[in-house]
Image (cartoon, helix red, strand yellow):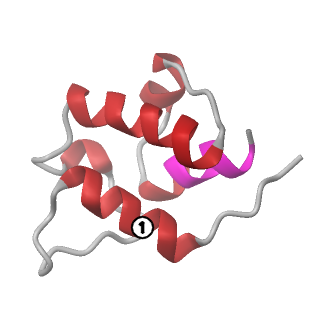
């Protein structure tokens, strides 16, 4: 069953996790591994966010299999 998750809210959460400056924007095709701020701590924080905000349990394999912002969004809506 697909969840309904507001895309703007999701982007805002991701932007906050990455602690990006306002001038930096994330597109759906942005590859998170290419963003300087992306690291293992942010990956763990994303897993915690998924559980707390969206009631989705993600593991390391899920995170390693995702590359773009869209991939991470899809992890949540398809859970």
Report the predominant secondary structure element of the magenta stretch.
helix
Q: Identify the residue at image location x=36%, y=57%.
A: 14
Badge 1 is on which residue? 11
- Against 77, residue 64 (above or below) is above
In the rendered view, tell whether residue 45 sits above or below residue 15. above
Q: x, y (%) of residue 43?
A: 33, 33
Is 4 left or right of 67, judged from the image as shown?
right
The quarter of the image holding the C terminus is top right
Q: Is residue 77 magenta?
A: yes
> Which residue, as the protein is rendered here, is positioned at the far front?
52
Q: Whole-percent x and y of residue 8?
A: 49, 76
Q: Is residue 53 left or right of residue 78?
A: left
In the figure, 36 relative to 43: above or below? below
Q: Residue furthest bottom?
A: 23
Nearest the camera: 79 or 70?
A: 79
Q: Which residue lies at the image location 17% right of the left edge and 51% below the top edge?
A: 35
Image coords of residue 22 (percent x, y)? 14, 78
Magenta extent: 72-78
- 8 over 30 or under it: above or below: below
Q: Which residue lies furthest to the right in this view?
A: 1
Point 40% across, 39% down: residue: 46
Identify the residue at the far top of this view. Answer: 60
Labels in figure, total: 1
């Amino acid at each position: 069953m697909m969840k309904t998750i507001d895309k703007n809210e999701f982007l805002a959460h991701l932007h906050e996790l990455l602690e990006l400056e306002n001038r930096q924007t994330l597109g759906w095709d942005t590859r998170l591994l290419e963003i300087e701020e992306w690291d293992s701590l942010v990956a763990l924080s994303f897993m915690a966010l998924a559980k707390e905000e969206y009631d989705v349990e993600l593991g390391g394999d899920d995170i390693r299999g995702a590359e773009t912002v869209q991939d991470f969004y899809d992890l949540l809506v398809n859970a």
